[in-house]
Amino acid sequence: PEFQPSDYNAKRLVESRRDLEQLLALTDEERITFGQGQKDARIKDIEKRMAEQRAENARLVEMRDKVKAWQPPTSEHDGLKKFMLEQLEISMHSVDYYEREIIEAKKSFARDYYDEAVKDAQREIEYSTKGDREERERTDARNRWVRELRASLNTPGQPN
């Protein structure tokens, strides 16, 4: 019969409005508690990712040391050793970004995290509203196209 628009954005819109309402309904004390929870979670996440990168670097260093100690069987294999060392160096991760992120996160106030959550919810409402409108417009256009096609096929005098 007819195409139906996806309800993904409509559902996200309902959820985002609910999230914003809940955030705005918090007392000042609850907002600080919420923000502190967000801040703690952010710092924990950064520390976790930094630890993962450091562990990966440790494995790469261990492998690099093994490659350095490896004696190629012939001079024709020297290029392979050089290539392996280059690839290991290229694969090393810099944790500078994470170190800066932790410093910034720790300097931020709990209220900053609350305020950012409110802005995120507002952006999600705008994004979902636009996405839902565009999905409905696309669906209307598809349905119109099919109706026009069907009408043209049922026009008297047209071969069927």
Image (cartoon, grey):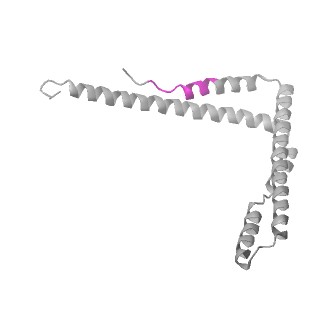
- Spot the residue most to the front: 73
Residue at horizontal 74%, vertical 60%?
Answer: 91
Q: Main secondary structure of the magenta part?
A: helix
Q: Is residue 8 magenta?
A: yes
Furthest residue toward left: 157
Residue 155 position, x and y percent, is 18, 25
Does the magenta run of residues contain 81? Answer: no
**Residue furthest out toward the bottom:** 75
Q: Nearer the viewer, residue 56 or 136?
A: 56
Query: Going 43% across and 31% down the picture, which residue do you hit?
Result: 137
Question: Quadrant where the N terminus lies?
Answer: top left
In the picture, which quadrant includes the C terminus? top left
Pick the front one: 23 or 80: 80
Residue 73 placed where, x, y %? 76, 74
Instruction: Answer yes or no: is residue 95 visible.
Output: no
Q: Which residues are magenta?
A: 4-14
Q: Position of residue 92 (x, y in %)?
A: 78, 60
Q: Position of residue 56 (x, y in %)?
A: 81, 53
